[in-house]
Every structure is written in structure tokens, then in C-alpha cells.
Image (cartoon, helix red, strand yellow):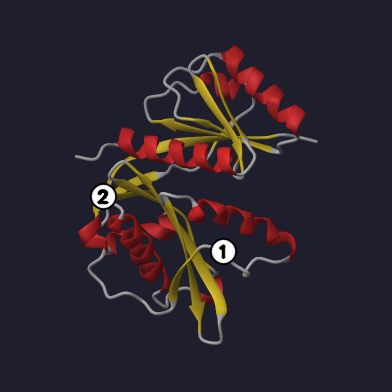
Amino acid sequence: MITVADCERVQANWFRLRAERLGGQVWTDGPLTWVDGPDGQNLLFPGAIPPAAVARGVEHAARSGAPIVGAWLGLGADASALAEAGFERGWSPWWMVAPIETVLGVEPDPRIELQLDSDDYEDEYAFYRDHLVLARDEPPRAWYAAAYAPGRDFAGRAWSFLDGDIAGVFDMDVWEPFQRRGFGTGLLRAVCAAAGAAGARHAVLNATPEGKQLYRARGFTQIGEGITWWLHRRP
């Protein structure tokens, strides 16, 4: 049975992997684990939150110039130290899970491609191409898929990450002009199929209200929720 703790572990390991492979930092300070990577600086699922350790994390963000610091918590966490440090409560991730075989209950979409590199990212988005180094790791543990509308218009993307027999689905997005055309279903199936071929038995993700309807249609059920807190640093 997949639990919220499993979902939290998979996301924490995904954040760690991205930081380690893309030139970021991961460090612990007592019970706190901080990750400073492509998603910015984040505190990941602490059990206890000492004020002094929070202050040191905020100081690190000031030194590195991070404009936003995130904290991902379970529902039972005491966030008073974050509030005292100036964090504000944000959105609640909805943890959802599905058996891999359920997600694969639709035909593959020919508009979706698994890729090891990409020329879709240019100008201010050119940095994202570096992320695809994760898809080239051996043995494979992360998969990237891109969606294309007719005319080869880049329509969206998604990742999956294998942690044990669980595939985490991350960074899934279909650009607004291409929504409601089935690209989300195709992307979800593609990255889950790739992880399933490598041994994943379950898929997990955190959903926003916008995405929950798609995931429920593909067999995901909500098993819990979390809390996010955010510190927006002034220059």
C-alpha cells in the first residue's frame, strides 16, 4: 500500500537528484534537509522545525541570492518557526497514486516522444535543456517526454522518476494553447510506461486543482495532502 510518506520520499529524492546532477547543493542541518537546485531552495518534509535551523537556511538563501524559499510539509508539522521567519502558507499538494497498469489503459499517443535531448528550449528557457542529462543516466532512472501538435509545435512535457518500485511524475505541463486535446493523457502514459518497463508498479504525483480531473480520469486516487510555505525574499 502506497502512503503519503512514500510520496514525500519520492519527491524529496527527485529534488535531491536534480540538485546533485545539475550543480546545486543538498545539506542537512539537524532535522532539516535543504535542497538548492533548479527548483530554487526548498526545505523537504521535516518532522521538527527548529527556529535556529530555519534562520540558517534563510541566511543561505540570502548569500546565494535565492528570491524564493519553499518548505514542503506534512499536515502534522508545526510550521510556527516558518511563520516567525516570514514564510507564508501556500498551496496544498494533493498526493495521488495509481497502479502503473491502470495508467497504461489507453493507447500510446504518436504525438508524444521520449527524448534524451531537446532543441525545444531557446533564449531565456535554454537552461532547461541541461535538465535532460537526467534522462541519459545509466541505468535509466528518469524519463522525459515531449508533446507535439501538428506542424511540430512544442505542446508540453513531463518527467517520471523511478524510486524503488514507485514512479514519481513531475513537471508535467501542457501549454495553454494546446490544452484539452489529449496531450496530458499521452504524456502521463508515456512517462509511466517508461518507468513501468524499468520496474515501477505504482505511480505517484502531487496534483493541483487544475490537474486533478485528468489524473482521476486516468485511475489516480487521492490518498492525502500536504502544505507548502513560501518565503519571498526582498532584494
How far from the left and from the top, in percent, is residue 130? 63, 54
First in sequence: mark 1 vs mark 2? 1
- Is residue 213 positioned above or below 10 on the image? below
In the image, 7 versus 95, the foreground residue is 7
Visible residue check, residue 207: no
* Figure check: 10 above or below 123: above
Q: The N terminus is located in which quarter?
A: top left
Q: Is residue 84 left or right of residue 7?
A: right
Give the side of residue 107 with respect to residue 94, left or right: left
Tally of numbered tags: 2
Instruction: Compare residues 60 and 119 and report the one nearer the observer.
Output: 119
Residue type (three-letter) at the residue carrying disc 2:
His
**Extreme residue toward the left, this view:** 1
Relative to 104, residue 87 above or below = above
Q: Secondary structure at mark 1?
A: loop
Q: Residue 191: horizontal and vertical position, in percent? A: 38, 61
Name the disc covering residue 202, or none. 2
Q: Position of residue 162 (x, y in %)?
A: 37, 47
Q: Which mark is residue 195?
A: none
The C terminus lies in which quarter of the figure? top right
Q: Which mark is residue 117?
A: 1
Q: Of discs 1 and 2, which sits in the foreground?
A: 1
User: Is the residue 38 above or below the residue 194 in the image?
Assistant: above
Give the amino acid at mark 1: Asp
In the image, is 182 to the left or to the right of 120?
A: left
Answer few, some or many: residues within 10 Å of disc 2's Cα (few below 14, many 20 plus, some between 14 and 19).
many
The answer to whether residue 184 shows anywhere in this view is yes
